[in-house]
Amino acid sequence: MCINMTIVFAVLIGLSFMIKFIHMIDPTKPKEKPAEAPKAAPAAAAPAAAAPAAPAVDPNLNIAVIAAAVAAYGGDAKIVAIRPIESAGWKSVGRANGVQNTVF
């Protein structure tokens, strides 16, 4: 059993060296540019403007997207009503999945 474990760890160490070697000679890695001298900052910088508020979401946009999806699907579909469904089902499933996947 000791020989088997030695072989396994030797192969793992060999793989780690191969990965490090591949990272060293990686041709897709962006080439380092020489450091440029820092430029002087402007003397009088304008005060920073307040961050723009998030754009308001148009509720009609959701209706347009749903209608486009139904039209793209084809057929003689008729949209009767579009209303949000309040359901805690997804939250419950997510919590149960998170609890189930914890390691004790």
Image (cartoon, helix red, strand yellow):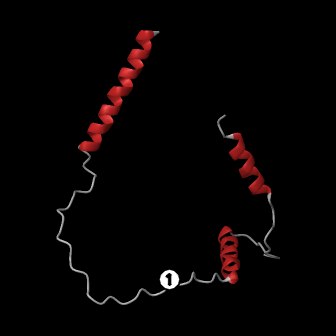
Q: Is residue 12 left or right of residue 84?
A: left
Q: Is residue 3 above or below residue 38?
A: above
Residue at point 50%, 83% (across, down):
51
Element type at mark 1: loop
Q: Is residue 3 above or below residue 52?
A: above
Res. 41 image quadrant: bottom left
Res. 67 image quadrant: bottom right
- List x then y, in percent, for residue 95: 73, 50
Residue at point 26%, 88% (across, down):
43
Give 93 or 44, whichever is nearer the viewer.
44
The amino acid beneath tag 1 is Ala
- List x then y, in percent, for residue 31: 22, 56
- List x then y, in percent, for residue 3: 41, 10
- List x then y, in percent, for residue 55: 58, 83
For mark 1, does the 10 Å Cα neighbourhood hold few (<14), some (14 to 19), or many (20 or more) residues? few
Q: Is residue 28 above or below residue 5?
A: below
Res. 103 image quadrant: top right
Q: Is residue 32 left or right of residue 61?
A: left
Q: Is residue 93 left or right of residue 17?
A: right
Q: Which residue is mark 1?
A: 51
How many labels were placed on the picture?
1
Residue at point 20%, 73% (across, down):
38
